[in-house]
Every structure is written in C-alpha cells, then in structure tokens.
Amino acid sequence: MKREDRAARLRSAAESTALVAQPRVYKRPNSARWTRAPQVLSAQSQLIRLIGTTGRVFEVPLQAALFSGTVRSMIESKNRVEGAVADEFKFTEIEDELLAEVIRYMEYKLKRQRDGYQGPFDIQDGMEVRLFRVANYLDL
C-alpha cells in the first residue's frame, strides 16, 4: 500500500502547478579570482605586445590575443614578475617567424568572428609541424 500511496502522491504533485521547475540562479562570489582581462590591463590598452626569441615586438589587438588560452591566463593572472609590464609578454622559446604566423592566425580568427569572413587561412609549406607545436603551446 505504501508504494501505491507514494505513486499517487507523485502523480498529483507532477500534475499540480506548484511544482513547476524553476531555473536556478548562481551568483558569482566577489573575489579576485573572477577578474577578467579588461580589469587587469589599463582601459586605454587595447594592444598586447608579444615578444619573440630575438626580441622582435609584435603588437596584437587584445581581442585577437585572447583566443590563445596561454595568453589569456597570463593576462588574467595576478602573479607577475617584479618589473614586468602588464601588457607585454615574452616567449623566448618561440621563433619570431612562427610567432608572426600565429599572430596572423589570431587576427584571421578575429576577423572571421567579427565580419563572418569565409576565406581560407594559408600556411607556408614546411611550417606545418612547427606551427602546430606553437599553436598547441599557446592553446589555440
């Protein structure tokens, strides 16, 4: 009899309007852990400087640089080396030629997202494997 009573209660509860599923609202805690890139960088800074092996400086739009998971985590991190500039990141293990190609891809991806650009992204012959390793390192 208990099973029948329980089944009847569940049926009546499902039919009643009192048990309509309500969406849950999650509130984010106020902590430094949730800060985002625009808060870490200055408001005027819309360009990020990426520096390759030989010291060549590439200026990249912030939105394009955020496609890289590695760069994003570096921007959002509160832990900085003393004397480091907030919008400058050095990659001493990435050759300038490869870094230039990866930046070209970031800008291509941004253009594709904003404008709906449909053109192909061409890679120079012989660079595929090295470029794949750099893209993997930068989490693209």
Image (tube, rainbow, N blue to C red):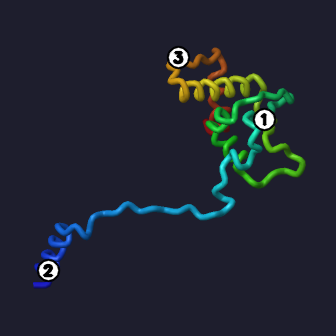
- The three-letter code of the residue at mark 2 reads Arg
Which residue position holds label 3? 119
The picture places residue 134, in percent across and down from the top left corner, at 68, 32
* Neighbourhood count class around disc 1 (C-alpha, 10 Å): few under 14, some 14–19, many 20 upward: few
Q: Residue at x 81, y 51 (%)?
A: 80
Is residue 20 shown left or right of residue 135? left
Instruction: Mark 2 or mark 3: name the one nearer the start of the chain.
Output: 2
Of helix, strand and loop, which one carries label 3?
Answer: loop
Foreground residue, 33 or 41? 41
Distance (Cα) linking label 3 and label 1: 30 Å
Up/down of 9 relative to 83, above or below: below
Nearer the viewer's eye, disc 1 or disc 2? 2
Report, in whole angstroms, how far the alpha carbon at label 2 lies from the one at label 3: 64 Å
Q: Nearer the viewer, mark 3 or mark 1?
A: 3
Residue at which label 2 appears: 3
Instruction: Give the percent coordinates (x, y) of residue 66.
Output: 65, 38
Residue carrying label 1: 93
Q: Quadrant of the C terminus?
A: top right
- Which residue occupies 71% across, 49% down? 39
**Compared to 4, does 127 lie above or below?**
above
**Residue nearest the viewer, comparing 56 with 43:** 43
* Mark 1 element type: loop
Quarter-of-image position of residue 29: bottom right
Disc 3 crowd rating (10 Å Cα; few below 14, some 14-19, many 20+) is few
Q: Residue at x 69, y 23 (%)?
A: 101
Q: Position of residue 85 (x, y in %)?
A: 84, 43
Q: Amino acid at mark 3?
A: Gly
Q: Position of residue 99 (x, y in %)?
A: 73, 28
